[in-house]
Image (tube, grey):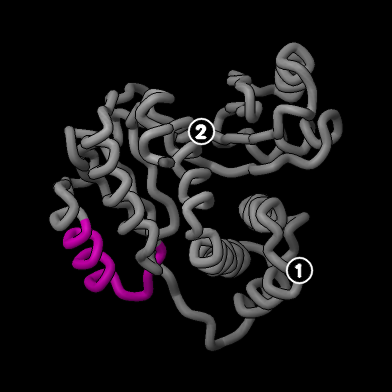
């Protein structure tokens, strides 16, 4: 996961931020609409919607965009989206999980399969790589929110399971079903998080050299560029030296 996070930072430095920002806003708005339609349009009464709104706010999605997305869920003309998970292997045997929301399953399946094939990967059957991941809640804070011990104590008191503290951020992990409660408790102690979401946490990782990393990043970029794809997770590990080469 840390590797994926670092790659996102490299993408921004390379000047893709405007395109990425627009797509991210669109995907978060879709999640808000679906969450509101499936439950209550009031975030205080709908945990999934509350998390979706919190994640949108953390990346500065404008309030009017959030409000429109919720309002859209209450209209008779709101699209019906199916949530689908695709699993496959990228270059060097890296396991890849793709989550999508679509109003046309055939279109999305065809697009995802084509992206895997064109970028040195293979789309697998359901369950082909899921066993390598675990569904978890993830709350991220900037490093300056406090030292590792302070964050660890706050996480323990909030009911979290694990904390990874690095130079850039603190990543707090919890059971997927506890994310709403844990994130609320953390807010009371540490303030607003930089990110709060459900993720697939890899249980093992595949180390990549520069060539393998470059090929995998092309696959991830292509998948993330698809309008139906919401998230992409892969179990790769890239050294700081290779990451520096990628960002050059």
The residue located at (71%, 21%) in the rendering is 155
Quadrant in which the C terminus appears: top left
Judge whether 25 appears above or below 210 on screen.
below
Along the viewing direction, whichever of 82 and 2 lies nearer the viewer: 2
Q: Residue furthest top?
A: 149
Judge whether 230 appears above or below 170 on screen.
below
| Percent of width and height locating residue 124 | 16, 46
Few, some or many C-alpha atoms within 10 Å of disc 1 (few <14, some 14-19, many ≥20)? few
The residue located at (62%, 79%) in the rendering is 72
Where disc 1 sits, the SS reads helix
Q: Is residue 38 visible?
A: no
- Mark 1 or 2, nearer chain start: 1
Where disc 2 sits, the SS reads strand
| Percent of width and height locating residue 34 | 54, 66
**What's the magenta region?**
101-115
The residue located at (19%, 67%) in the rendering is 110
Residue receiving disc 2: 136
Q: Nearer the viewer, mark 1 or mark 2?
A: 1
Tell me: 106 left or right of 5.
left
Residue receiving disc 1: 63
Q: Residue furthest bottom?
A: 77
Is residue 108 covered in magenta?
Answer: yes
Along the viewing direction, whichever of 202 and 247 lies nearer the viewer: 247
Q: Main secondary structure of the magenta part?
A: helix
């Amino acid at each position: 996961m840390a590797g994926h996070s670092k790659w996102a930072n490299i993408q921004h430095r390379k000047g893709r931020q405007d395109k990425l920002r627009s797509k991210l806003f669109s995907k978060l708005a879709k999640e808000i609409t679906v969450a509101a339609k499936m439950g209550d349009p009031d975030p205080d009464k709908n945990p999934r919607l509350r998390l979706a709104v919190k994640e949108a706010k953390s990346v500065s999605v404008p309030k009017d965009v959030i409000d429109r997305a919720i309002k859209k869920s209450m209209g008779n003309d709101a699209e019906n989206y199916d949530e689908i998970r695709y699993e496959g292997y990228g270059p060097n045997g890296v396991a890849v999980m793709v989550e999508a929301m679509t109003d046309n399953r055939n279109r999305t399946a065809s697009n995802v399969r084509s992206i895997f094939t064109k970028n040195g990967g293979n789309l697998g059957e359901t369950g082909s790589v899921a066993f390598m991941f675990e569904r978890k809640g993830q709350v991220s804070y900037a490093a300056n929110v406090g030292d590792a011990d302070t964050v660890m104590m706050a996480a323990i008191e909030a009911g979290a399971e694990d904390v990874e503290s690095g130079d850039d951020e603190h990543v707090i992990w919890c059971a997927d079903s506890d994310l709403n409660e844990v994130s609320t408790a953390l807010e009371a102690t540490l303030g607003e998080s930089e990110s709060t979401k459900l993720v697939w946490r890899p249980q093992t990782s595949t180390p990549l050299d520069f060539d393998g990393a470059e090929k995998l990043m092309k696959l991830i970029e292509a998948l993330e560029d698809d309008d139906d794809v919401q998230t992409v997770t892969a179990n790769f590990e890239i050294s700081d030296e290779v990451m520096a080469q990628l960002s050059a």
